[in-house]
Amino acid sequence: MRIILIIIALSTLTSCNKASADKSIVQTDYDKAHSVEVKLHYDEPIDGYTVSATCFVDTTSNYDSPNTNGNRNAIVGRAYIHFKNDTAQFTVENPLFSDYTLMANQTSLLDGINIKATYTPFSPNIKPDNMIFNGNQSPFFFYDIDFDGEKELIVTLWEGMEYHAHNSYEVYKVRNTKSDEILQPLSTTPFDRIDDYTLIDTVAKTISICKGIDAMKIMGYDTYYLNK
């Protein structure tokens, strides 16, 4: 069922759509037929940004994730996350948006509802295996993943790996702009293949990408040297 959810979420990105009143939000025909629009407002600034999110929750299948424990009010779905401060204003689109707090939501999901959200900060995995993101519970965070001294925006694709509910990630370079454009994630390797099993060595400045998993076993890594 999780595979079906991911296919539906990703397919809406390319389906025929119609812009809502906010030009940075696109509501698809699928959204209109199957989803409710949930507006989230984070109660405190995050890395200097005021952050809100508009999430289209498919109420027919949002409780199928093992992390919901059958909760039909779980907030998980395609979302637009809006960031704003004195020098920048931008939006990113996430086809698989959620976090543990949103999965446990008990507020009834009505179309257009506004919910005050509490941000779950990123806490790196400190185990010596360098799987820094493994176990992450944050929906997005800022982290210098390319070792250039400036933090990138890392957006969590909730359960995007499909391996025991593990996450995958999209990486964004943040540009100072007030155009309120929808930013595009980095599409170059290794940044387009980041997930919970990625090894990040902050000393050697390398990123190692999992080649795949077979019978619960990682099938090796491709290692990339950065900032040399």
Image (tube, grey):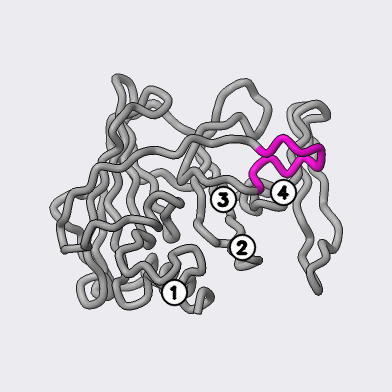
Question: What distance separates the C-alpha of mark 3 from that of mark 2?
Answer: 9 Å
x then y, percent, for residue 195? 64, 52
Nearer the observer, disc 3 or disc 1? 1
Q: Secondary structure at mark 4?
A: loop
Instruction: Write down the residue under mark 4.
Output: 198
Q: Is disc 1 surrounded by few (<14), some (14 to 19) or many (20+) residues within 10 Å?
A: some
The amino acid pointed to by label 1 is: Asp
x then y, percent, for residue 81? 34, 45
Q: Secondary structure at mark 3?
A: strand
Instruction: Write down the residue under mark 1.
Output: 64
Nearer the observer, disc 1 or disc 4? 1
Q: Secondary structure at mark 1?
A: loop
Q: Is residue 164 above or below residue 132?
A: below
Query: In the shown orientation, is residue 182 left or right of residue 193?
Result: left
The amino acid pointed to by label 4 is: Thr
Residue drawn at x 62%, y 20% as measured from the top left: 149
x then y, percent, for residue 25? 25, 53
Front residue of this view, candidates 28 and 159: 159
Q: Is disc 3 surrounded by few (<14), some (14 to 19) or many (20+) residues within 10 Å?
A: many
Point out which mark residue 169 bears. 3
Question: What distance separates the C-alpha of mark 4 from that of mark 3?
Answer: 10 Å
Question: What distance separates the C-alpha of mark 3 from that of mark 1?
Answer: 21 Å
Q: Earlier in the sequence, mark 2 or mark 1?
A: 1
Q: Earlier in the sequence, mark 2 or mark 4?
A: 2
